[in-house]
Amino acid sequence: MSLIEITEVRKSFGANEVLKGINLDVEPGEVIAIIGKSGSGKSTLLRCINGLENIDSGSISVAGAQLQPDEIHLKALRLKVGMIFQQFNLFPHLTAGGNVMLSQMVVKKTAKPEAEAMAHKMLERVGLAHKFDAYPDELSGGQQQRVAIARALAMQPIALLCDEITSALDPELVSEVLAVVRELAAEGMTLLMVTHEMKFARDVCSRVVFMHQGRAHEIGPPDAVFSNPKTPELKQFLGML
Ligand code: ADP
Ligand code: MG
């Protein structure tokens, strides 16, 4: 059994079919890069895996449990699968530590002392132990995104979905966030990441999924996808045509 099983998933917004039968099985510890043009369905796919969008047909299962579109199941799913976005969405009136504590206390009903201990631990993991009491506007974009990663990790997810998490950052701040992701990957975290960082995808990912017009147009190990693309669409995307 794979950790995440995506089978024939279809999703439309009105008449616009955005996912046209996606199949992808993700093994525990895999790091998968999702690449492709804007509008190809990358974000929608991640949002479906996290239950932020309901699928029209097909199935998605996470750790053996099939996604059901009702609140109880969705809540359980969001406890298992973390998601990090381009925008960090930290609460401005809470410190870094407070941000990492809040969802644990609200969603998981973790008691405050445990949530606080976990927040210290996770901020340390992303290299921000010393920023526990700092407010978001006292942090750089890269630091804020690392707090967002710590917040997701504090929920102890079995997989993390990352949607262009370095795209809103100034170029000089990208590497500190990628370094954290690289470390998570090395520790065995299962990661699905939509990214434009091709070098990172090549170095760190076990497989690359090229999305094109709502389909997983090509899937393969990074070497095959980047050095030996099969389809003209991928060649064009990579600037080889
Ligand atoms: P990507 O992340 O690859 O840029 P998206 O998954 O965001 O692509 O979008 C794929 C398509 O779905 C686009 O045509 C987009 O306009 C459309 N879409 C995404 N979300 C919605 C929504 N909530 N309502 C209507 N259309 C949407
Ligand atoms: Mg997107």
Image (spheres, helix red, strand yellow):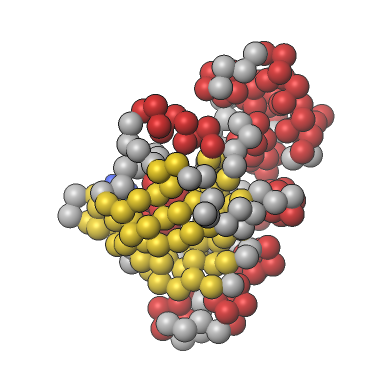
In the figure, 227 relative to 46: above or below?
A: below
Left or right: residue 216 compared with residue 209 = left
Q: Quadrant of residue 113?
A: top right
In the figure, 36 relative to 91: above or below?
A: below
Q: Is residue 67 visible?
A: yes
How many numbered circles does the render carry?
Answer: 0
In the figure, 150 relative to 14: above or below?
A: above
In the figure, 133 relative to 181: above or below?
A: above
Judging depth in this view, the residue of 84 and 3 nearest the camera is 3
At horizontal 82% and vertical 29% (from top left) the residue drawn is 130
Q: Where residue 13 sits: x, y (%)? A: 24, 49
Left or right: residue 77 compared with residue 131 = left
Q: Is residue 179 visible?
A: no
Q: Where residue 14 sits: x, y (%)? A: 19, 49
Judging depth in this view, the residue of 20 and 95 nearest the camera is 20
Outermost left residue: 15
At horizontal 54% and vertical 73% (from top left) the residue drawn is 220
Q: Where residue 63 sits: x, y (%)? A: 52, 45
At horizontal 53% and vertical 32% (from top left) the residue drawn is 79
Q: Quadrant of residue 202?
A: bottom right
Left or right: residue 184 compared with residue 93 = right
Outermost top residue: 112
Judging depth in this view, the residue of 217 and 170 nearest the camera is 217
At horizontal 49% and vertical 66% (from top left) the residue drawn is 209
Q: Where residue 10 sits: x, y (%)? A: 29, 56
Judging depth in this view, the residue of 233 and 228 nearest the camera is 228
Outermost right residue: 130
